Image (cartoon, rainbow, N blue to C red):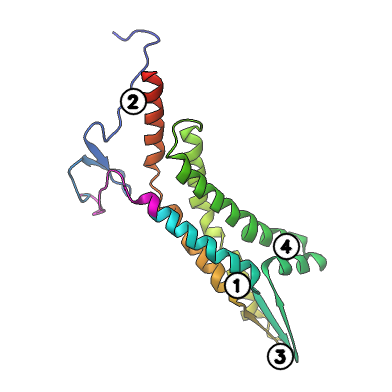
Amino acid sequence: MELVGTPKKTVTARAAGLVACTRCARAWPLETEVCGRCGAKLISRDVNSLQRVWALWLVGLMCYVPANLYPMLRTQQLFSVDESTIIGGAVELAQHGAFGIATIILVASVVIPLGKFWAIAFLALSVREKGGYASRHRLLMYEVVEYIGRWSMIDIFVVAILSALVQLQGLASITPGPAAFFFALSVIFTMLSAQSFDPRMIWDAQADTDEASGNG
């Protein structure tokens, strides 16, 4: 008989001697190395996860700096060449009345990347600390970071479309600037950094907090 008010102890898969496949979610005995259903490698906890997260995060941040300093778009018209950075191009669009497009570019190229850098760093730091943040909120943040990663290449798409469409009878040409290369690298490395993060560490930190509060 269960007494009212008696706290329930959460049993994790690792405590029960099981390991879950991160690809198909099938549970296997802890000593199993390869998932028998999908063939994925089974790891209870990736001990080197945070090292890869920080390494890829740092490289992505290093690439993001020149992506904003160098020109993203180079427009050549007759004998004049006009180069614009990400922010400079958004400002020019706003000056021509394209406020919606300018806002989309600023959000996708400045707000979202900076938000991803902050969120990944926050998650990597928070799993080393006990308490302070709800695990479900951190997991939601991780899922949002993974979801919006596919929308971070909007600048590259715009440059590619403009380069293909703008053909004013040979009088003008649009080519990608060096910032496009660095921006693409920054997006790729931040996506890899987010994918290297093991979200199960969020619940490990919560379990440590629950044990500490129970012992106290």
Mark 4 vs 2, N-terminal side: 2
Whether residue 97 is in magenta: the answer is no
Residue 43 visible, this angle: yes
Q: Nearer the viewer, residue 8 or 196?
A: 196
- The residue drawn where x is 54% and y is 73% is 181
- The residue drawn where x is 55% and y is 70% is 182
Q: Residues within 10 Å of mark 3 (few under 14, many from 20)?
A: few
Mark 4 vs 1, N-terminal side: 4
- Element at badge 4? helix
Magenta region: which residues? Answer: 36-51
| Labels 1 and 3 touching (C-beta < 8 A) | no
- Quadrant position of residue 25: top left
* Three-letter amino acid code of the residue under disc 1: Ala
* Three-letter amino acid code of the residue under disc 4: Ala
Pointer 4: what residue? 102
CA distance separating discs 4 and 1? 18 Å
Whether residue 30 sits left or right of residue 77 in the image: it is left
Q: Nearer the viewer, mark 4 or mark 1?
A: 1
Q: Nearer the viewer, mark 1 or mark 3?
A: 1
Whether residue 74 sits left or right of residue 141 in the image: it is right
